[in-house]
Image (tube, grey):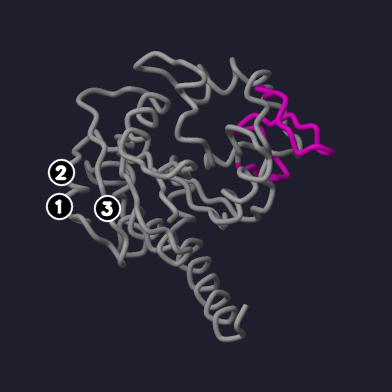
């Protein structure tokens, strides 16, 4: 069984000028909530159970998706107060049953193959595998520093100069007991307080099999998502259908 955690508790403050007052993952993309597109994609990749980490207007998400979506079981990890991305992941992991779990941001759509991500995590023996994507300009995000021969992530460069490089795609494969092995506080940022500070100990594996990344976090990219996400989803559905019909 493949289990996934989606961080869906964000307010979407930067989207307020163009989106109604709903949780950011519920922002409408081509007539559907963004989270609908993300869950639909996971169902195509044989994910069987999803834990939605929710906080802001959690009832909007719960009322829309209920307990089952496209054959997937939907569970909810409800924060009583914002715990940061790390605290949200730690809390949601308490509801997982698999040794290895996929974690995704609820405002980012990519072409990641979650099965391959978890397979790379398992064969590597690492506690964490992080999806990265190559961009021609990393200025908005900062870049990931890698030992490319070993596919190991060794640091992060927050310089905002315009240059090509790899960025963190915000998708992780991790061991369920990662925070038992590496203790953390109740509230923390997964990226700033855990990944960055523990990078030498964690030695995460880089998963580089990603070509497309769409982040709806700012109005400009949200506008682009209206056509890019349906196009990408349609193409992938066709590709998967072709794979199925050919027996691969």
Q: State the quadrant of the N terminus.
A: bottom left
Q: What segment is highlighted magenta in the picture?
A: 131-158
Proximity of marks 2 and 1: CB atoms separated by less than 8 Å: yes
Residue lying at the far right of the rendered structure: 149
Q: Which mark is residue 121?
A: none
Neighbor class of circle 1 (other Cα within 10 Å; few <14, some 14-19, many 20+) is few
Residue lying at the far bottom of the rendered structure: 245
Residue picked out by circle 2: 59
Using the numbered discs, state the Cα–Cα distance from disc 1 to disc 3 in whole angstroms: 12 Å
State the image quarter where residue 93 is shown. Answer: top left
Using the numbered discs, state the Cα–Cα distance from disc 3 to disc 2 in whole angstroms: 14 Å
**Coordinates of residue 149 in the picture (x, y in percent):** 84, 38
Neighbor class of circle 2 (other Cα within 10 Å; few <14, some 14-19, many 20+) is few
Give the mark count: 3
Residue picked out by circle 3: 74
Label 3 SS: strand
Residue picked out by circle 1: 63
Neighbor class of circle 3 (other Cα within 10 Å; few <14, some 14-19, many 20+) is some
**Coordinates of residue 53 in the picture (x, y in percent):** 31, 38
Residue drawn at point x = 48 percent, y = 52 percent: 109
């Amino acid at each position: 069984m493949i289990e996934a955690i989606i961080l869906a508790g964000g307010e979407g403050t930067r989207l307020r000028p163009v989106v109604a007052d709903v949780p950011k993952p519920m922002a409408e993309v081509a007539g559907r909530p963004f989270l609908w597109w993300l869950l639909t994609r996971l169902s195509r990749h044989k994910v069987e159970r999803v834990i939605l980490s929710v906080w802001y207007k959690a009832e909007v998400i719960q009322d829309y998706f209920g307990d089952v979506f496209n054959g997937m079981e939907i569970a909810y990890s409800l924060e009583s107060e914002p715990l940061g991305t790390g605290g949200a992941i730690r809390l949601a992991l308490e509801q997982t049953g698999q040794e290895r779990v996929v974690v995704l941001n609820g405002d980012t759509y990519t072409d990641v193959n979650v099965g391959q991500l978890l397979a790379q995590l398992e064969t590597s023996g690492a506690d964490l595998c992080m999806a990265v994507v190559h961009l021609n300009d990393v200025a908005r995000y900062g870049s990931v520093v890698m030992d490319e021969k070993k596919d190991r992530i060794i640091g992060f460069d927050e310089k905002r100069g315009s240059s090509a490089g790899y960025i963190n795609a915000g998708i992780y494969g991790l061991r369920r007991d990662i925070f038992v092995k590496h203790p953390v506080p109740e509230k923390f940022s997964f990226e700033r307080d855990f990944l960055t500070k523990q990078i030498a100990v964690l030695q995460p594996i880089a998963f580089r099999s990603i070509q497309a990344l769409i982040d709806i976090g700012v109005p400009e990219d949200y506008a682009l998502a209206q056509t890019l996400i349906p196009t990408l989803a349609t193409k992938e559905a066709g590709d998967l259908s072709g794979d199925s019909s050919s027996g691969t």
